[in-house]
């Protein structure tokens, strides 16, 4: 090769290396921006997604945005295996890319309900006078905000989100989604002598939640505005779960604040329609009808084959001493976990590449196995169902409760249980677009009894959604209700690094308060053993 040829090769190699460095820098910037949007923190190559506050839900959203915005076929498993930004970017460069889809999202034909809407509709229809599927929302106002302005902002949010204008009337024997172009929402004013305190707001929310909401006529919510003179003190909504979920509360608070700010400045609020649940539902229907969807249903159903039927809970008191409970009526207990153990649980999760939910679920399964004598359990988990970017910004019901199968085997290291729970949770998370009723239908087609979800476990950050405006602040929360959708549920609520609280709901006709107290003690004992943590007062 001539000297000229050698020089040309060197230049080409140098140019290729420079392009690779530039491409990697651009990819790093793009992924870091997605992390910042989701986690609210700047990230460098050595930062860990979960140490910055990530969890399974945010990892699902990150994967969806990387797929949509960067055209890279990343999976949830990839984000759990490559948790640091630099390692994830290096891995992403090895994955196949695809052109961004030009597909136009269209709502489901014929007004068909989405799988999530249908699941809630069916559950609610079993007890139409019950209120277990009503959600009480309190948006508290601190500072100076006119009541008329907040009421007008609610109208703006209703215009923007079709779920708040949706009903599910029966057409023949089947429900149909019907979205109204506009709805009249009477907002009941409650004038208070001074700002109402937390107890008064709980009282107002509970009072309104006592009446059921008929699913056939929009809107599927009621609104009250507590006012101190002409100043807004709180907006209270009683909304049916068929059109609302936990993410919806975050969006509601944010958009109420933005619309209040726009109106206060004399600007027009952003009323651009957001693609509603029908868009995601149409995609889901098409996916389930295709080979990939059918395969996913069979895989998830197959993982539950041979699951023992759930037996009755053992009772610490004779059945005659426990007052029977009407359908949906429940009881609850809140139990604080000491700060030392809370920090140890988080450290254990990070060491094992797990989340707070996975650690809590492992302890819950061990405690439940001890209570029931069953070492092969199906524990329900609420998956967000928001696996596309547009779904992340839509008010509506997307949540999908799916069973996670957990096997325990008597005395064994907690790390072994946690490893199985981690694998099982990620498996179900990969299949979270599969509706549970499709799984049950698969069993019926096979001539087998379908699985049931009678108990559930969840973990969530209870940092309240907030919006800070000029001279006022909005904070939102879901009010506690005396309702039980399942026989037993435990929510592990986190507020900061050293605060964990277990929120237990149960049906008093099946369990007593002392049963649940004993279950909580066993749950905490399992966490202590797993983390090697002594009681705080020892």
Image: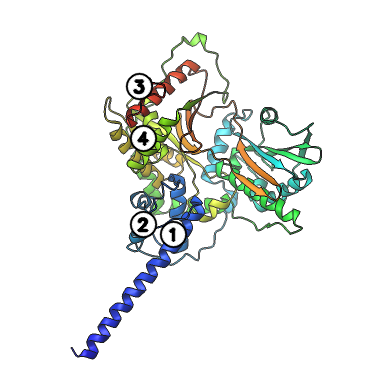
Which of the 4 image quadrants contains residue 270?
bottom right
Distance, label 3 to label 2, CA atoms, is 40 Å
Q: Nearer the viewer, residue 403 or 369?
A: 369
- x, y percent for residue 167: 65, 43
Contact between marks 1 and 3 (CB within 8 A): the answer is no
Distance, label 4 to label 2, CA atoms, is 29 Å
Circle 4 residue: 405
Does any portion of residue 444 appear in the rendered image?
A: no
- Mark nearest the camera among 1 and 3 is 1
Residue 370, disc: 3
- Mark nearest the camera among 4 and 2 is 2
> In the picture shown, does residue 110 fall above or below 127?
below
Circle 1 residue: 31
- x, y percent for residue 23: 39, 69
Mark 3: few/some/many CA within 10 Å (<14, 14-19, 20+):
some
Which of the 4 image quadrants contains residue 444?
top left
Q: Residue at x 66, y 43 (%)?
A: 474
Circle 2 residue: 88
Mark 2: few/some/many CA within 10 Å (<14, 14-19, 20+):
many
């Amino acid at each position: 090769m001539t000297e000229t040829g050698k020089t040309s090769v060197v230049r080409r190699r140098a140019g290729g290396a420079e392009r690779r460095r530039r491409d990697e820098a651009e990819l790093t910037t793009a992924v870091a921006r997605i992390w910042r949007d989701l986690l609210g923190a700047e990230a460098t190559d050595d930062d860990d997604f979960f140490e910055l506050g990530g969890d399974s839900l945010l990892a699902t959203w990150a994967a969806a945005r990387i797929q949509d915005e960067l055209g890279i076929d990343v999976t949830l498993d990839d984000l759990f295996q490559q948790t640091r930004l630099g390692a994830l970017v290096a891995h992403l460069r090895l994955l196949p890319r695809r052109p961004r889809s030009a597909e136009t999202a269209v709502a489901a034909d014929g007004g068909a309900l989405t799988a999530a809407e249908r699941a809630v509709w069916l559950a609610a229809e079993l007890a139409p006078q019950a209120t277990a599927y009503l959600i009480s929302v309190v948006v508290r106002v601190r500072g100076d905000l006119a009541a008329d302005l907040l009421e007008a902002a609610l109208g703006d949010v209703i215009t923007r989100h079709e779920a708040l204008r949706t009903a599910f009337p029966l057409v023949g024997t089947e429900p149909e989604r019907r979205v109204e172009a506009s709805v009249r929402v009477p907002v009941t004013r409650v004038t208070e002598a001074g700002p109402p305190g937390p107890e008064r707001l709980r009282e107002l929310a509970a009072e309104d939640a006592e009446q059921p909401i008929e699913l056939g006529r929009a809107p599927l919510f009621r609104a009250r505005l507590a006012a101190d003179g002409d100043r807004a003190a709180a907006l209270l909504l009683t909304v049916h779960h068929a059109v609302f979920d936990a993410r919806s509360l975050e969006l509601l608070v944010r958009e109420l604040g933005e619309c209040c700010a726009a109106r206060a400045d004399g600007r027009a609020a952003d009323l651009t329609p957001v693609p509603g649940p029908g868009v995601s539902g149409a995609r889901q229907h098409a996916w389930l009808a295709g080979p990939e969807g059918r395969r996913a249903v069979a895989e998830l159903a197959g993982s539950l084959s041979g699951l023992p039927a759930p037996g009755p809970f053992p009772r610490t008191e004779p059945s005659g001493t426990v007052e029977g409970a009407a359908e949906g009526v429940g009881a609850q207990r809140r139990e604080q976990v000491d700060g030392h153990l809370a920090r140890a649980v988080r450290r254990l999760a990070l060491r094992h590449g797990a989340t707070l939910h996975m650690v809590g679920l492992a302890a819950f399964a061990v405690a439940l196995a001890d209570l029931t004598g069953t070492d092969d359990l199906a524990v329900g988990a609420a998956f967000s169902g928001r696996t596309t970017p547009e779904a992340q910004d839509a008010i509506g019901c997307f949540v999908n409760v799916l069973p996670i199968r957990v096997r325990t085997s008597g005395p064994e290291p907690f790390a072994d249980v946690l490893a199985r729970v981690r694998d099982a949770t990620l498996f179900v998370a990969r299949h979270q677009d599969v509706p549970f009723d499709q799984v049950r239908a698969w069993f019926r087609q096979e001539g087998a009894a379908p699985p049931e979800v009678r108990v559930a476990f969840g973990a969530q950050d209870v940092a309240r959604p907030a919006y800070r405006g000029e001279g006022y602040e909005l904070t939102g929360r879901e009010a506690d209700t005396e309702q039980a959708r399942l026989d037993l549920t435990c929510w592990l609520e986190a507020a900061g690094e050293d605060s964990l609280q277990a929120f237990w709901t149960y049906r008093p006709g099946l369990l007593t308060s002392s049963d649940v107290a004993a279950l909580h003690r066993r749950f905490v004992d399992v966490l202590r053993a797993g983390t090697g943590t002594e009681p705080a007062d020892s």
